[in-house]
Amino acid sequence: MKNTSLLFFAVVLTVSCAKQGAVEGPVTDKWNGYGKYLKAGEQVHTLWAGKNINIGTVTYGIDENANFYVTYDCSASGWKMSETHMYAGDKKNMPLNKPGAPKVGLFPNSGYHDPRKSTFTYRVPLSQLPPCASPGFVVAAHAVARSPYGQTETAWAEGDYTFSDKGWGWYDDYYYNTPPNQATILYGTAITFDTLRLYHLDVTNGTGELILKEYVGNNPGTYDGAAFDPESGAFLFTNYSTGELWVNFLQEEDPSFCAGTLGGTAASGTFYDGAYYYVNEDLNTINKVTFSSSWAISGEIILDTIPGTVTINDIAMSPAGDYLYMTGQYNDGATELISWEVSSHGFYTMSMPINEGAQIAFGSDGVLYAVAPVDEGAGNSTVYIIDLEDSVLTEIEGSGFSFFEDTFTDISLGPVF
């Protein structure tokens, strides 16, 4: 775990650079605003190999020659490093793949060590980093290390933030003034008949970006039933026409693959605790799907039947897994929000004045959001916050997404990057 050598350094991380007292003596341009931290001390982070093996430390600090330094030290454990990769710079320029896993081979500070090394230090002139006041910089330290017994593992210096929801690999935002949770992220699939189109949606700023366009399988159909597993990084979706359930590991470069065929027709999907949930349109049942270790469908059961004549548009499991929320229409009436309590199998409804076809998902901030078309066939959508305690639907001003011919078939949680 992370330790601080001086209490003052911990204070530095929670307060804006501009509010710190200056170091005694002149500060020249080479310090780039960081001279005030010269005497703040160091931060020591655990270097974890294979996610859970403590093999040493990585130390961050500033030296008297106006350098930011990163020192790897595995000498106490006997492990030795054959590669080291370190990034220090503006967060927006960090080399990442879709949609946010680090490309360590493109980190500007990289070394391949033969013979292997127990310790190694990188130094970056502060003048080459973004100015302290805006925005400061982030740092990430990676290594490939080998144990005295021949075990080789990837290693990361522990930090406050992970690169993706899969949770392997960290970075820190030292001297970085931008709030770490500045945007709520959702993912949306668009209506197409032969190609998956996946959008990354920044709900906070009302922007969207097409991040994946892929022809899936040999059977054309509309793609729907989007869901995301934060533990593995798997994004799941269905081919509405064929009932196929597909999986894509968004943090990797591999294409989507078919996990198998569902027992019913799914135009909705959500994921919780290792299982995929959907409403079978044919029987109006809530179904739970489980998987093998290789992400092949291993089982499917019916959990409950939705009472009455109801058409379900979308579903979302609460972060705690205690309620399944559904949008739909009873007897072709107005849209309602229907909740199903997992433990008691009780159904509850509340009115929700929103256009037909609304899709729902819990965002990266744990809030339930709805995305609904402004007008049928118009190709644009509006985002709403659903207050589950007060039964209030609030439109996010300025949140209109416009994707020309595309309208969302579903939305889902997804990786934050």
Image (cartoon, rainbow, N blue to C red):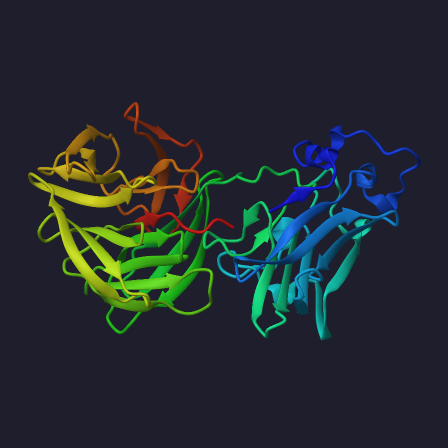
Total numbered circles: 0
Q: Residue furthest top?
A: 390
Location of residue 386 with respect to 193 vertically, above or below: above
Q: Is residue 277 left or right of residue 105?
A: left
- Between 229 and 57, the one lying in front of the other is 57
Q: Is residue 224 left or right of residue 334?
A: right
Residue in the picture at 55% in, 56% down: 169
Q: Is residue 46 left or right of residue 117?
A: left
Q: Residue furthest right?
A: 25
Residue 250 percent coordinates (x, y): 43, 60
Residue 316 percent coordinates (x, y): 28, 43
- Between 364 and 310, the one lying in front of the other is 364
Q: Residue furthest bottom?
A: 114
Q: Is residue 403 left or right of residue 258?
A: right
Q: Quadrant of residue 381?
A: top left
Residue 181 percent coordinates (x, y): 53, 39
Location of residue 153 with respect to 88 vertically, above or below: below
Residue 102 percent coordinates (x, y): 57, 60
Residue 33 seen in the current view: no
Location of residue 15 with respect to 33 vertically, above or below: above
Residue 65 seen in the current view: yes
Residue in the picture at 31% in, 45% down: 378
Location of residue 180 with respect to 169 vertically, above or below: above
